[in-house]
Image (spheres, helix red, strand yellow):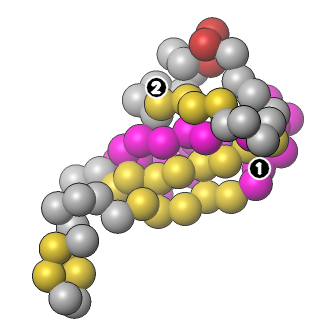
Amino acid sequence: MSTLYEIRVAGHLGSEWAAWFEPLAIRNEPGGEATLTGPVRDQAALNGLLNKVFGLNLELISVMRVPSPTQETPFGRA
């Protein structure tokens, strides 16, 4: 089971990076940041993605786990 993550980096990423970060979607934000969002299989895969970010010398702003619409919470579904 995959978990959704949102990884924010400084600067915009061109469409040529889509295959590199697959299956994450790249969204360039108006403020000059890029958001990579999508499913990550496990912690090892997350580590691999972060290694790509660091290897490309991108400035990491944040990594956030995103609740899926069907994820259970203590009060029912999110």
Asked if one can make out residue 71 in the rendered structure from this viewpoint, the answer is: yes
The residue to which callout 1 is attached is 60
Q: Is residue 52 magenta?
A: yes
Relative to 4, is 77 on the left or the right? left
Residue 27 lies in quadrant: top right
Relative to 18, is 41 on the left or the right? left
- Name the residue located 34 percent from the left edge and 56 percent from the top edge: 3
Q: Secondary structure at mark 1?
A: strand
Front residue of 40 and 29 = 29
Question: Where residue 38 appears, x then y in whole percent?
Answer: 41, 41
Residue 35 lies in quadrant: top right
Locate the C terminus and report the quarter of the image it occupies.
bottom left
Check the image and report above or below for 39 versus 13: below
- Name the residue located 35 percent from the left edge and 64 percent from the top edge: 67
Write the start and end of the magenta stretch as one range.
33-61
Q: Is residue 51 magenta?
A: yes
The residue to which callout 2 is attached is 22
Residue 42: image tag: none
Check the image and name the residue furthest to the top.
16
Total residue callouts: 2
Asked if one can make out residue 54 in the rendered structure from this viewpoint, the answer is: no
Q: Secondary structure at mark 2?
A: loop
- Name the residue located 19 percent from the left edge and 88 percent from the top edge: 75
- Name the residue located 78 percent from the left edge and 41 percent from the top edge: 31
